[in-house]
Amino acid sequence: MTRRLTNDPAEMVAIGLERLGVLATDGNDLTRPRLTTHSFSGHADAIDQVAVALRHAGFATEIDDDDARDVSAQAMTVTDEPWLREAMVILCRVADRFGVTYEGWEALADQSHT
């Protein structure tokens, strides 16, 4: 049985807009670059391929040592709405290309708010 992937950029944008709202409400400057971490899960072979593709795109990647079914990708970027709308389309397409699930992203708060 094949699992249907749910890498929906529109859904990820909606979730991301909430996250951006929280960052802004907490006083973070969304025009400042911050460390963002994106998470993917799937079959170990596909996760290895995703990690390579993301490294080629400029991300630092780390595969979960426990089960090799998760990879995180980090980059410094401005996390504003235009970034969100573009990044979610790209990252969901990457996930679909390799048959994995894009789990979402996190971003560090401004240094003065941590």
Image (cartoon, helix red, strand yellow):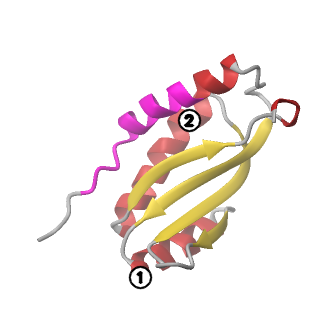
Label 2: few (<14), some or many (≥20) within 10 Å? Answer: some
From the top left corner, tell me how far across and down residue 14 is, in percent.
43, 29
Q: Quadrant of the N terminus?
A: bottom left
Residue, x 67% and y 35% (percent of image)?
79
Which residue is the extreme one toward the right? 112
| 47 with respect to 110 (left or right) | left
| Disc marking residue 84 | 2
Which comes sooner in the sequence, label 1 or label 2?
A: 1
Residue 14 in the magenta stretch? The answer is yes
Magenta span main SS: helix
Q: Nearer the viewer, mark 1 or mark 2?
A: 1
Q: Which residues are magenta?
A: 5-19
Question: Which residue shows up at 72% across the image and 43% down it?
Answer: 77
**Secondary-structure class at tag 2:** helix
- Measured Cα–Cα span from mark 1 to mark 2: 28 Å
Identify which residue is drawn at 42% across, 64% down: 41
Q: Amino acid at mark 1?
A: Asp
Helix, strand or loop for disc 1: helix
Q: Looking at numbered disc 2 in the image, what kind of residue is underneath it? A: Leu
Q: Considering depth in this image, is 86 or 100 the residue closer to the camera?
A: 100
* Residue 81 % position (x, y): 59, 27
Is residue 72 within the magenta segment? no
